[in-house]
Amino acid sequence: MTQDSFFETLERQYQNQLPFVVYSRAINSIIKCWLQKDDMLHTTLDFIESGFVFAPFDLNDKSILLPETECEHLTLEISNLDLDEDFKTTTIENYGKEQHVQLVTKGIDTIRKGELSKVVLSRKVEKDIENTNPLIIFKRLFNTYKNAMVYCWYHPKVGLWLGATPELLFKVEGKQLTTISLAGTKPYSEKDEVSWTNKEYEEQQIVTDYITKQIEPHTSDIKISEVETVRAGNLLHLKTYIRSRIKVESSLKSVIEALHPTPAVCGFPKEASKQFILKNENYRREYYTGFLGELNLKTSKTRNTNRRNVENNAYAVVRRHSNFYVNLRCMQLKDEKAVIYVGGGITKDSVPQNEWEETVNKTKTIVNVLS
Ligand SMILES: C=C(O[C@H]1C=CC=C(C(=O)O)[C@@H]1O)C(=O)O
């Protein structure tokens, strides 16, 4: 399939106001799209179906499903997309500083009183944009962020979201579970080596400890990697891989409930920090810090390629795989406006002014592709 026909099909789907998702996983030159045949709103409660999931921060709200059987699927293999124009990026007025600093200060006070260890506080910022074509913005995201899962998701009854997320919530292949602990942020600089402080190490360790404890009842054989630095656009983060095997009696839903929302987007302890967020952030996150991705898709692997072992060649092992990304560095397109969502982890050592600047830096991931 050519780039032109791939994007023309998507453009028609959008013009006809039918649901779709177009996405590409990190370090990958494959772009996939799912086109739902009608505009029905499907949801999932148990995560047992096969499809593409778009889930909110608060799982009491609806998790939307594009069911595999209701969709046409297209794939495009390409490393860079042609863009018709050289776009001139816009800038953004980061209003709302006082309110965000107050929110962060309240978070720090609550942590110092011992009620929480960490809370992730966020805000949204709106920007009028000239080019509101989501597929053009998607192409820019794909060309710009090779280390991220980039996507554009649309449902006429829900809205239109785009993002370039650096964070895997988890992936499952057969019974193998891989998740990451990603937290701590510094600006990326070509010249200077990054120097992490205790604040970031502590913030990230909270996430690693939490994930390990949460998956323990559902998995065995847990292995934790060394901490490494990873780049996400103009930012650097600390990252650890956590690998394990899901127990036979555990379901995918139980793993989702154990992990989502992680302290990288919510806080610790989970329920208390979630309540703090719902009560004190002055807006609804909706799908920001929710998760999205492929649910229970079939992978078929031939068991044995040894020609002499003809009997075994007859069996292809059918496995299921899922991979979910946390919906970060994202925006909603609404009424000719981009609504950008950004947040940061607050601990006892946080400095409100620095936390404000961190959110300003995080807006750049999205602002860089707007015009
Ligand atoms: C909540 C966000 O980032 C999270 C992921 C990585 C690093 C983070 C941090 O350093 O605060 C956040 O926990 C966001 O980008 O909106």
Image: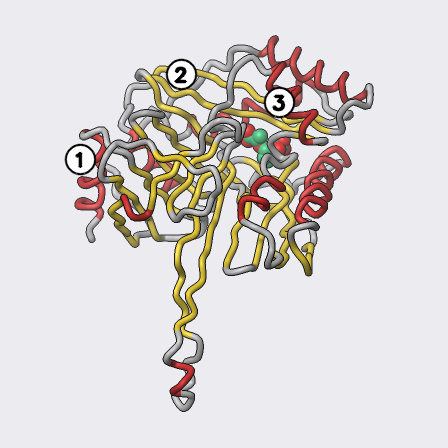
Q: Nearer the viewer, mark 2 or mark 1?
A: 1
Cα distance in 3D space between marks 2 and 1? 26 Å
The residue wearing badge 1 is 12
Give the residue drawn at x 51%, y 33%.
290
The residue wearing badge 3 is 121
- Of all residues, the one furthest to the top in this rendering is 98
Circle 2: element type: strand
Image quarter of residue 163: top left
Q: Quadrant of residue 109?
A: top right
Q: Nearer the viewer, mark 3 or mark 2?
A: 3
> Counting residues from the N terminus, which is met first, the one under dot 1 or under dot 3?
1
Ligand 1 - quadrant of the structure image? top right
**Picture residue at 63% right of the left edge, 56% below the top:** 243
Q: Is residue 186 visible?
A: no
Report the amino acid beneath label 3: Leu
Residue at mark 2: 127
- Residue 333 in the image, given as x and y percentages of width and height: 35, 23
Whole-percent x, y for residue 70 in the image: 27, 44
36 over 316 or under it: above or below: above
